[in-house]
C-alpha cells in the first residue's frame, strides 16, 4: 500500500452533453470549464466518458447498429491528436488537472473508450476501458491505471462498466489508490435506474475500499439533454458529500485525506486472507465441478456443539 496523502484536494465533477464528432467544439467547452474551475480553486476536474468525441452510447435503431463500426471509427481520434493538445495547454495554464474521455483509435486500428488524465507539468496517463460488454466494436483495455500526483494523492481511473465489477475497484484500492475517478457516458438505462446505481453501488465501492470516488456522467444530445447529466462525489465512508441535480452545474468538494485512514474499508484491507481467494482469479466453473475452499455438503460431524434456544411468542403485527 502507498503512503496516504496529507493535503486536502479540491475536486470538481463537470457533466455536460458532448456534440457528437465535434471534437474542436467539445475541447473548447472543456477549456472554458477548466478556466472557470480554476477561479474556484479546483485542483482536479473530472469530465464524462467520451466527452471529447461523443458517440459512445449505444444507438437504439437496429439499422444504426449495423453501421456501428464505421460510425465509431469516424468519431475516433488519437490521444496524440493536435486537437487534444489544447486540453494539455489549458491544464498547464490554469494549474487544474483534468480527466477527459474519447473514442481512441489505437496504433493497430483498434477502437477504445479511453480516458486521458492531464496533470500540470506535462504528465499524461491514459486508461482504456476494461469492461466493454454490449459495445462489441470497442476493444477492452488490458491493465489498470493508477498513478501518483505531485500533491501526494494516488489516483485510479475506471470508466463506465469498469465500475460495475467489485474486483476492479478492489484492485484499484490494493494498488494504493485513495481517489477513484469514475467517468460514465449516457446509456439505455432510465434516469431512475441511473439514480439507483449512483445512490447504492457507487457509495458501496467507496465504502468497501476506503477511497474517495468522483463520478461524472454525460448527457444525451436532444430536447432534454440538460436533464440527463449527473455528478457525485463520495467519501471513503460511503457518504455522498456532493451531488449535482440533473441539469445542474459542476459539483465541488474538498477531499480530506484523514478520512481514508479512518474509514472501515481501508482498515479492513489489512485483514484480507489472500490464501482463501484463489478462485477469484479463475474463470467461473459449473457448481458441480467446483471443489475446494468451502465446507463440502457431505462433511462429517467434527464434535458436538451445545445449542440453547427459546420459543418466544411473536406479536402478529411485528416483523
Image (spheres, rainbow, N blue to C red):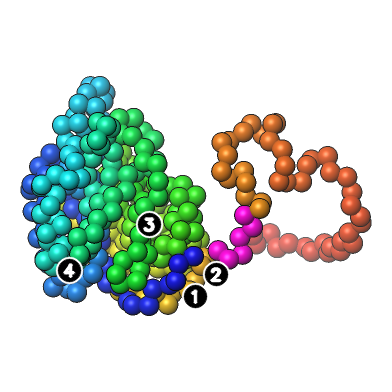
Magenta residues, as a range?
269-274
N-terminal-most mark, 3 or 4: 4
> Within 10 Å of the Cα at label 4, are there few (<14), some (14-19), or many (20+) other Cα atoms?
many
Question: What residue would you read off at disc 4?
Answer: 95
Say the numbered circle drawn on residue 267.
Answer: 2
Q: Position of residue 194 (x, y in %)?
A: 34, 49
Question: What residue would you read off at disc 1?
Answer: 262
> Within 10 Å of the Cα at label 3, are there few (<14), some (14-19), or many (20+) other Cα atoms?
many
Q: Nearer the viewer, mark 3 or mark 2?
A: 3
Q: Is residue 271 magenta?
A: yes
Label 3 to label 4, Cα distance in Å? 21 Å
Q: Is residue 7 above or below residue 232?
A: below
Q: Nearer the viewer, mark 2 or mark 4?
A: 4
Question: What residue would you read off at disc 3?
Answer: 146
Label 2 to label 4, Cα distance in Å? 33 Å
**Majority secondary structure of magenta residues:** loop
Residue 86: quarter of image:
bottom left
Cβ atoms under marks 3 and 2 closer than 8 Å: no
Q: Position of residue 295 (x, y in %)?
A: 76, 46
Circle 3: element type: strand
N-terminal-most mark, 4 or 1: 4
- Residue at x-position 35% and y-position 59%: 147
Label 3 to label 2, Cα distance in Å? 20 Å
N-terminal-most mark, 2 or 4: 4
From the viewer's perspective, is 79 left or right of 288?
Answer: left
Label 3 to label 1, Cα distance in Å? 22 Å
Residue 172: quarter of image:
bottom left
Q: Is residue 221 visible?
A: no
Say the numbered circle drawn on residue 250.
Answer: none
Amino acid at each position: 500500500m502507498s503512503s496516504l496523502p496529507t493535503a486536502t484536494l479540491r475536486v470538481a465533477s463537470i457533466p455536460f452533453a458532448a456534440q457528437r464528432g465535434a471534437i474542436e467544439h467539445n475541447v473548447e467547452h472543456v477549456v472554458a470549464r477548466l478556466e472557470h474551475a480554476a477561479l474556484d480553486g479546483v485542483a482536479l476536474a473530472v469530465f464524462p466518458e467520451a466527452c471529447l468525441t461523443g458517440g459512445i452510447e449505444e444507438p437504439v435503431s437496429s439499422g444504426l447498429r449495423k453501421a456501428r463500426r464505421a460510425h465509431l471509427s469516424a468519431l475516433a481520434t488519437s490521444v496524440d491528436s493536435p486537437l487534444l493538445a489544447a486540453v494539455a495547454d489549458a491544464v498547464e495554464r490554469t494549474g487544474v488537472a483534468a480527466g477527459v474521455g474519447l473514442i481512441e483509435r489505437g496504433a493497430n486500428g483498434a477502437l477504445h473508450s479511453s480516458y486521458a488524465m492531464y496533470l500540470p507539468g506535462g504528465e499524461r496517463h491514459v486508461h482504456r476501458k476494461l469492461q466493454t460488454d454490449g459495445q462489441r466494436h470497442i476493444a477492452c483495455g488490458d491493465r489498470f491505471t493508477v498513478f501518483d500526483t505531485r500533491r501526494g494523492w494516488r489516483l485510479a481511473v475506471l470508466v463506465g462498466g469498469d465500475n460495475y465489477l467489485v474486483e476492479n475497484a478492489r484492485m484499484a484500492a490494493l494498488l494504493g489508490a485513495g481517489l477513484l475517478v469514475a467517468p460514465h457516458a449516457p446509456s439505455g438505462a432510465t434516469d431512475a435506474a441511473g439514480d439507483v446505481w449512483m445512490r447504492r453501488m457507487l457509495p458501496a465501492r467507496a465504502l468497501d475500499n476506503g477511497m474517495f470516488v468522483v463520478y461524472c456522467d454525460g448527457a444525451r444530445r436532444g430536447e432534454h439533454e440538460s436533464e440527463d447529466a449527473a455528478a457525485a462525489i463520495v467519501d471513503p465512508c460511503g457518504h455522498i458529500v456532493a451531488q449535482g441535480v440533473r441539469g445542474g452545474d459542476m459539483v465541488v468538494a474538498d477531499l480530506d485525506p484523514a478520512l481514508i485512514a479512518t474509514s472501515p474499508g481501508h482498515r479492513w484491507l489489512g485483514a484480507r486472507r489472500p490464501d482463501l481467494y484463489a478462485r477469484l482469479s479463475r474463470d467461473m466453473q459449473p457448481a458441480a465441478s467446483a471443489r475446494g475452499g468451502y465446507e463440502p455438503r457431505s462433511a462429517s460431524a467434527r464434535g458436538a456443539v451445545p445449542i440453547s434456544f427459546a420459543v418466544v411468542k411473536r406479536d402478529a403485527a411485528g416483523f
